[in-house]
Image (spheres, rainbow, N blue to C red):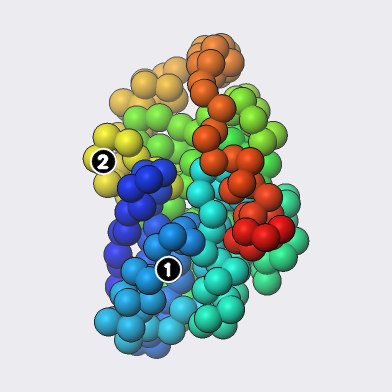
Amino acid sequence: MIFRQLFEADTSTYTYLIACERTREAALIDPVLSEMDQYLAVLKELDLKLAYTLETHVHADHITASGKLREVLGSRSVVHRDGGAQCADILVDDGDTLSVGDLQIEVRHTPGHTNGCVSYVMADRVFTGDALLIGGCGRTDFQQGDPGKLYDNIHGKLFSLPPETLVYPGHDYQGNTVSTIGREMAENPRLGGGKQRDEFIQLMTNLNMAYPRHIDRALPANQACGNVNS
């Protein structure tokens, strides 16, 4: 497998490139519109054909590049059916699978941050978007957030993965790049170390975080697959 972890500094967003070495088919997970030139350059450098853009959810902090990549390269955009982006080419649900050449990707529906959150599971790794972060998790106070639902899905659908499974999140604000399921189960301050559901709900309910600074522009654009004029 070809793998690259790319970073957009303004919103501390990770985008992931995965590709099949044999077929040269590729997918980008959570691409950011401002980074289009970087994606096109990497795909050209590695001689890859972009088959899919995979969204972990409809984002409130950046505008997706999925629509522009579809326009330029003919890739197909993938969003969960509850995400609110009917413009996507493929609306997935829990348990669906996608093939990128010889690579298999399982969709796990992990709502709680938003209704349409998914995690993408591969043989040795999981891309968790904003559901499970390294030492944290996504906020639950807007965009259909539900702390109880997030707790249940992280414990039921992510912490049930093998402990050595690599965790690649949608964001990190401290320079971390990768964790493991076992480490997050043991050490995550919000969710690990035996943290009980009611404790988690109380914690998340009292975070009192600032209003997302890009949400008023990003959310409607992402519901239109990155069309900033919508």
Residue under numbered circle 2 = 176
On the image, the x and y values in percent for residue 41 come to 32, 77
Task: Check contact, mark 2 vs mark 1: CB within 8 A.
Answer: no
Is 27 in front, or is 215? 215
Can you say which quadrant of the picture contains the N terminus? bottom left
Image height of 5 relative to 152, above or below: below
Task: Report the side of 27 relative to 93 (left or right).
Answer: left
**Type of amino acid under label 1:** Met
**Type of amino acid under label 2:** Asn
Image height of 187 relative to 125, above or below: above
Task: Report the side of 224 relative to 118 (left or right).
Answer: right
Q: Nearer the viewer, mark 2 or mark 1?
A: 1
- Tell me which residue sits at (24%, 40%) in the image: 175
- Tell me which residue sits at (52%, 23%) in the image: 210
On the image, the x and y values in percent for residue 35 come to 40, 63
Question: Does the rendering let one see residue 219?
Answer: yes
- Tell me which residue sits at (48%, 61%) in the image: 33
- Tell me which residue sits at (59%, 40%) in the image: 215
Residue 21 position by quadrant? bottom left
Image height of 125 relative to 155, above or below: below
Is 226 in front, or is 18? 226
Q: Which mark is residue 197?
A: none
On the image, the x and y values in percent for residue 195 come to 45, 18
Mark 2 lies on a secondary structure that is loop
Between the C-alphas of marks 2 and 1, the distance is 23 Å
Mark 1 lies on a secondary structure that is helix
Is 216 in front, or is 192? 216
Residue under numbered circle 1 = 36
Image height of 70 relative to 141, above or below: below
On the image, the x and y values in percent for residue 225 come to 64, 62
Residue 22 position by quadrant? bottom left
